[in-house]
Amino acid sequence: MGQDGLAALFLATALGNSLILGQGWALDRLLEPRALREAALHGVLTALVMTLAAAGAWLLRTLLLQPFGLELYAGFALVLLVAAATAAAASALRRWRAGFAATNWWLIATNAGVIGTTVQVQQSDTGLAASLVIGFGSGCAFTLALLLLCGLQRRLQPAQVPAAFRGLPIALLNTGLLALAWSGLTGLGQR
């Protein structure tokens, strides 16, 4: 998967999160802008789970899968590791601060599973440090995409958006424009 594919993956996951984390499924309230702080916390927790899962995936791959020729099961094992990393992070953070109990941990696990499986399965010959950087960097890219979408929603809220474009259509338009901008920026470094 190239850089454009990864950008589309991050933006699609961020759009799905914007839809799910909205204040309900009523069409008029579907994409009300949330606080950027909530979106940032959601993204940071996803990056934490992805980093933990990347470390576990590297250990599992080097200690169990590669020696026994079971690399085919790396994606399935990563999904199980994401579930374990999410449970460990949720348990530790709930003890630290009770406010984390209201966090959508199932959505964080889904994000880390989708993005982590897509990214980690592609590079099976990386070291521990590279796996950690890839996991953390993917989580940060997801956080950036989520913050960009939430920021655009907040900026468009007071604007006069035609009735036909309110809600989901403007969110899809925003996501498409961000995807175009992101693919334009990734093309700058190539020659």
Image (spheres, rainbow, N blue to C red):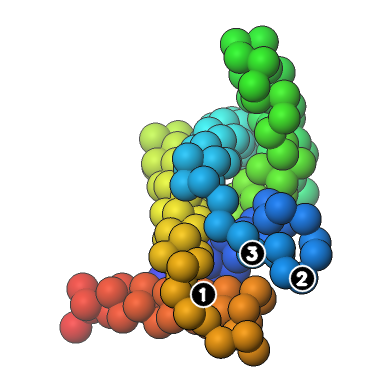
**Is residue 145 at least partly visible in the picture?**
no
SS for dot 3 = loop
- Above or below residue 10? Residue 169 is below
> For the residue carrying disc 3, how many other residues have a C-alpha within 10 Å: few (<14), some (14-19), or many (20+)?
many
Please, what is the three-letter code of the amino acid marked with disc 1? Thr
- Above or below residue 41? Residue 88 is above
Quadrant containing the C terminus in the rendered view: bottom left
Residue tagged 1? 175
Mark found first going from the N terminus, 1 or 3:
3
In the rendered image, residue 82, in percent from the top left (x then y), is placed at: 69, 39
SS for dot 2 = helix
Q: Disc 1 versus disc 3: distance between alpha carbons? A: 13 Å
Nearer to us: label 1 or label 3:
3
Asked if the residues shown at circle 1 and circle 3 are in contact, with their CB atoms under 8 angstroms apart, the answer is: no
Q: Residue at x 76, y 41 (%)?
A: 106
Question: Front-most of 155 and 91?
Answer: 155
In the rendered image, residue 53, in percent from the top left (x then y), is placed at: 61, 36
Residue tagged 2? 27
Residue tagged 3? 31
